Image (tube, rainbow, N blue to C red):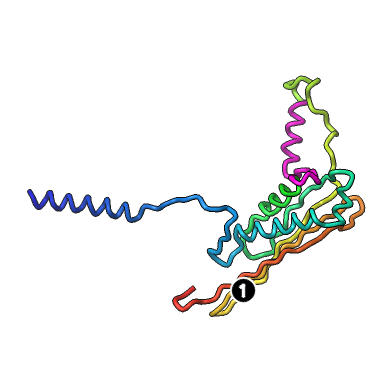
Amino acid sequence: MKNSTLITTLFIAIIIGTGCAQKSIVRYGDATAVETTDINFGSTDLQKVANDMADSVLLSPVVGTLTENSRPVIFVERIKNKTSEHIDTESITDTVSTKLLRSGKFRFVDMGRVEAARKQLEFQHDGGMVDSTKAIQFGRHVGAKYMLYGNLSSIVKSNKDKSDVYYKFTLRLMDLESGLVEWADESEIRKTRTKGAVGW
């Protein structure tokens, strides 16, 4: 009986000990801290290219003349991902457009939500569900004057000892009336991974 109790006690202790040993700890980190977990495009890269582009737009003397007397309306075209990785390029343009909007120099049209806005306007005018004196009128949306668009591309080279990835993010601002590109810039990132003595 004593042996059975001892075995049961040891078994419970092993289970509890194993559970404690495998318990993970979660902590908040600094969202702007440099992360270098691997060679792929990461949050630090996203923040770098987005901030580089937003700062370049705001500091450009050409853009300064465009925004001198008004807050021009821009729409953002989805960034083309020309890399071999799955990268959420919308997050890049979200960061750029948010920073430009906060500057007070630009206004934006959200083309990704036009269909949702159209459905709401149709709801307000069809079926008598909304008081017609309070319904928003059709044809009063403001059109964009400029389009912000670009590409994210990469070149990858590797051998048995070293891997090298070069990223280039290009952004342009086009005047929709004239078709002229009023501003363009690029942000570059290079990452290298070298094989260590023990492994990668």
For image coordinates 82% across by 51% down, the residue present is: 147
**Is the residue marked by circle 1 packed among few (<14), some (14-19), or many (20+) residues within 10 Å?**
some
Q: Determine which residue is flagged by label 1.
A: 164
- Principal secondary structure, stretch drawn in magenta: helix
The quadrant in which residue 111 appears is top right
Residue sitting nearer the eye, 67 or 18? 67
48 with respect to 161 (left or right): right
Q: Among all residues in the image, which is located at the extreme right?
A: 178
Is residue 120 highlighted in magenta?
yes
Residue 30 at what x, y percent from top left? 55, 53
Residue 144 at x, y = what percent?
Answer: 84, 45
Tell me the residue at 87%/43% (across/down): 70
Which of 193/131 is in front?
Answer: 193
Q: In the picture provided, is 168 more to the left or to the right than 69?
A: left
Q: Nearer the viewer, residue 111 or 99?
A: 99
Q: Which residues are magenta?
A: 102-125
Q: Position of residue 5 (x, y in %)?
A: 12, 49
Q: Is residue 122 magenta?
A: yes
Q: Amino acid at mark 1?
A: Asp
**Label 1 secondary element:** strand
